[in-house]
Amino acid sequence: MRVLVAALMGGIVMFIWGAVAHMALGLGDVGMRQPVAEDAVLGSLRPGLGEQAGVFVLPSVDPAKMHDKTVMDAYSTKAKASPYALVVYMPQGDDLSDMSGTLPRQWASDTLSALALAFLMGLAAFSFMTRLSIALAAAVFAWLSTLVPYWNWYRFPTNFTLAALIEQVIGWLLAGAVMAWWLGRGEHRSRL
């Protein structure tokens, strides 16, 4: 039960921190840009990408043809001469200002992440600082295993990637501190 309560507390702290980081500090906007001609880009998406939602890398190459030297040489030449884009595409559109679905999913994600972290933090009678170090290690692990590969392979902007590190480290240190405090409460009483 201690782990579940710690997870709920950590999830709430992380969710609130995410709101502050994005809405007050602008960490979620670092590296994001507005298109110069948004209507022209939007008008070209459906004819260029079709009717199926997905993630598109432009320029692209058919994975089935990656072993064909001629195809890969042509792709390499095109890639060097063309702009690059990673596009998350939804042909049907969506009201991105309606957060009635995304906010609960974010809270659930934060709380499930906190549950995994609380489980690790509660495995033994660790000190507060050891538990806080576990939270820091988890934040850095999550960043290294997710955002750094996106930066490396999909060319996410460096400033976007570093802002995500700041957001994750501060958020999980805050949530981790609350969780470490909660998990350590009963242990101090049992030692007396």
Image (cartoon, rainbow, N blue to C red):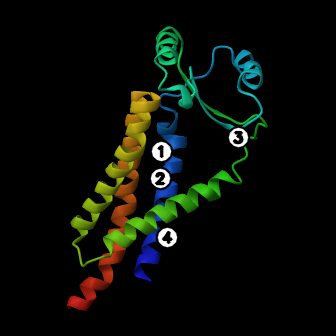
Question: Is residue 165 found left or right of 39 in the rendered image?
Answer: left
Q: Residues within 10 Å of mark 1 (few under 14, many from 20)?
A: many
What is the number of the mark on residue 96? Answer: 3
Q: Name the residue type under label 1.
A: Ala
Q: Residue at 70% across / 40% down in the picture?
A: 96
What is the number of the mark on residue 21? Answer: 1
Does the CB distance between marks 3 and 1 fall below 8 Å?
no
Work out whether residue 82 or residue 184 is closer to the camera in this orientation and state it. 82
Q: Name the residue type under label 3.
A: Leu
Q: Name the residue type under label 4.
A: Leu
| Residue highlighted by disc 2 | 17
- The numbered mark, 1 or 4, whose residue comes first in the sequence reads 4
Q: Position of residue 89 (x, y in %)?
A: 67, 34
Q: Name the residue type under label 2.
A: Trp
Vertical arrangement, residue 33 with respect to residue 20, above or below: above
- Report how far apart the C-alphas of labels 3 and 4 lie in the structure: 27 Å
- Report how far apart the C-alphas of labels 2 and 1 lie in the structure: 6 Å
- Report how far apart the C-alphas of labels 2 and 3 lie in the structure: 21 Å
Does the CB distance between marks 1 and 4 fall below 8 Å?
no
Question: Is residue 172 found left or right of 17 in the rendered image?
Answer: left
Vertical arrangement, residue 145 with respect to residue 28, above or below: below
- Can see residue 29? yes
What is the number of the mark on residue 8? Answer: 4
